Image (spheres, grey):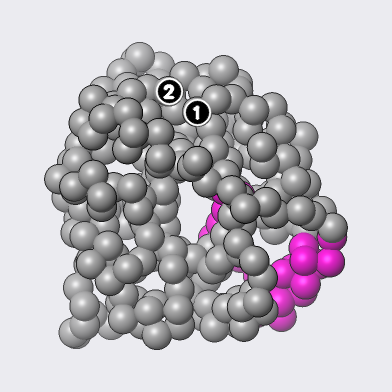
Amino acid sequence: MRKQIAAANWKMNLTIQQGEQLIDDILAIPHDIKDNQEVIFAVPAPYLAMAQQKLRNKENVFVAAQNVYSKKSGAYTGEISVDMLSSLAVQYVVIGHSERREYFNESNAFLAEKVNICLDNNIHPIFCCGEALAIREAGTQNEFVASQLKESLYHLSADQIRRIVIAYEPIWAIGTGKTASSAQAQEMHAFIRTSLTDQYGANTANSISILYGGSVKAANAAEIFSQPDVDGGLVGGASLNAEEFASIINALQ
């Protein structure tokens, strides 16, 4: 059974004191995380040690980094290595978020290098993919997402790709005033799973969690998560509110 996941992406928000309080507030709200479910906190790099300390004894709750570099070490001022993450026992890292692609020009080939170094060092990538508004309006979203998967992931073996979490971000539905329906989310998630099936077979495809990253909030989480190929959410703004994110955790199937 593939994991159902509620992943919080704090992005570049909160002071460390605010982050500590947010984790405390979320943990204080009753929630029942089942064996097939995980909660992941993707926090800013300076807060990784704090988050690990706060969550170290929590069952099925993990910390993720928001970024990692493609080299093990060296003269790369300001970057974060897999060894740094491993030394903090970080098990997940977000790779290929739309903001990293747009603002920092991260290519599919560069993201493939990041995926490789993470897997080689026992860190699970949360690999983001998704199309912008112009691509959606042109009706070429399937081809675009297929290229992202092919160029960054499909060099992997079946055993390797089973260690990946995929997050679909409909960039056109984030901050544009447009809304992606649960049916639209399911449509793309089903396409991604079909693509995985074509590449790796149904058993592997059905073992990979695919998260939805399009403005998930407490009000729509249950409906979105009820879709057969949606395995949870990568949550941005709503993860900065304790009650909102706790409700999203409780909406996992």
User: Is residue 145 one of those drawn in magenta?
Assistant: no
Q: Quadrant of residue 47?
A: bottom right
**What whole-number distance in Å separates the C-alpha atoms at marks 2 and 1?**
6 Å
Residue 20: in sight, yes or no? yes
* Residue 224 vertical position relative to residue 58 in the rendered view, above or below: above
State left or right for residue 112 relative to residue 52: left
Q: Quadrant of residue 124?
A: bottom left
Residue found 75% across the figure and 46% down from its top:
250
* Quadrant including the C terminus: top right
Is the residue under label 1 in contact with that under label 2 (CB below 8 Å)? yes
Residue found 64% across the figure and 28% down from its top:
226
Q: Where does residue 138 sit, x and y in percent of width and height?
A: 34, 15
* Disc 1 residue type (three-letter): Asp
Q: Where does residue 18 sit, x and y in percent of width and height?
A: 72, 74
Mark 2 falls on what kind of element?
Answer: helix
- Residue 101: numbered disc: none
State left or right for residue 184 relative to residue 23: left
Report crowding for label 2: few under 14, some 14 to 19, many 20 or more residues within 10 A (C-alpha).
some
Residue under label 1, please give it.
Answer: 229
Tell me where the magenta segment starts and ends, as one range.
Answer: 5-29
Residue under label 2, please give it.
Answer: 190
* Residue 8 vertical position relative to residue 148 in the rendered view, above or below: below
* Disc 2 residue type (three-letter): Ala
Mark 1 falls on what kind of element?
Answer: loop
Report crowding for label 1: few under 14, some 14 to 19, many 20 or more residues within 10 A (C-alpha).
many
